[in-house]
Image (spheres, coloured by chain):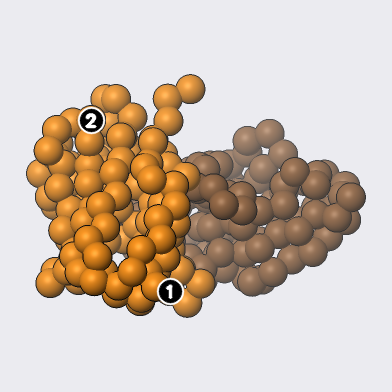
Amino acid sequence: SQQGEEDPQALSIQEGENATMNCSYKTSINNLQWYRQNSGRGLVHLILIRSNEREKHSGRLRVTLDTSKKSSSLLITASRAADTASYFCATVATSGSRLTFGEGTQLTVNP
Amino acid sequence: DARVTQTPRHKVTEMGQEVTMRCQPILGHNTVFWYRQTMMQGLELLAYFRNRAPLDDSGMPKDRFSAEMPDATLATLKIQPSEPRDSAVYFCASGLLWTGGSQPQHFGDGTRLSIL
């Protein structure tokens, strides 16, 4: 069963707008990771946030983590058509190293 | 850039046939994962290996699926006999991981399998 649940399932925005995706999970985690998947390709790691971190930035990406609410958000600022992809959150439990993926958010950025 | 390589990229075969999917992990990575992705179930972990030893294959149907790592440069996933419900995209990923480790996984581009 999936650990994470992304919200929304699909998001369509215009180029230049910001995109926010949310992820909720159920168990205690060591870290949470976000991945991107372009159509017909494998997943690409975007950013990792540890359980003792609250916010992390990488270029146009900003990730927040609230362990008390068991939730995370991914913000993509100034979106581009090339950001069109599915975005997945994945958690690593405190007791292991395997990733458990959510169902993903399909982001469409219209030019 | 180092990449995980999967072959074949596409496979179409009839039910009952044996299917073998191959993966070359990134050199130096100690952990290899096999995932299956479908519209209905999303991404499911089938099995993973650390230092070539199987650690967890609880996600795999044991009667028809088998995963091996004959050497550090090759991981295989076999289905025998294949069934239409096995149709999916199978991903291999590798990483430098340990318990509670905080390193990303690197994915191949998958094998798109269709069982007729």
- Please state the chain letter of the residue tagged with numbered disc 2 in the rendered image: B
Q: SS class of the residue under badge 1?
A: loop
The residue closer to the viewer here, B86 or A111, is B86
Q: SS class of the residue under badge 2?
A: loop
Q: Mark 1 belongs to which amino acid? A: Gln
- Quadrant in which residue A20 is drawn: bottom right
The residue closer to the viewer here, B55 or A6, is B55
**Is label 1 or label 2 in front?**
2
- Residue located at (17% from left, 53% from top): B67
- Quadrant in which residue A22 is drawn: bottom right
Q: Position of residue A29 (x, y in %)?
A: 36, 58
Mark 1 on the same chain as mark 2: yes
Residue for badge 1: B41
- Give the mark nearest the N terminus, 1 or 2: 1
Tell me: residue A8, above or below residue B71.
below
Q: How many callouts does the rendering have?
A: 2
Q: CA distance from mark 1 to mark 2?
A: 29 Å
Residue B101 visible, this angle: no
Q: Position of residue B29 (x, y in %)?
A: 27, 31
In the rendered structure, the colour chosen for chain A is: brown
- Residue located at (18% from left, 65% from top): B80
Q: In the image, is A10 to the left or to the right of A51?
A: right
Where the N terminus of chain A falls, by quadrant? bottom left
- Please state the chain letter of the residue tagged with numbered disc 1 in the rendered image: B
- Residue located at (80% from left, 47% from top): A81
Q: In the image, is B89 to the left or to the right of A94?
A: right
Among the chains pictured, the one given orange colouring is B
Residue for badge 2: B73
Q: Mark 2 belongs to which amino acid? A: Thr
Q: In the image, is A86 to the left or to the right of B64?
A: right
Q: Position of residue B34 (x, y in %)?
A: 30, 53
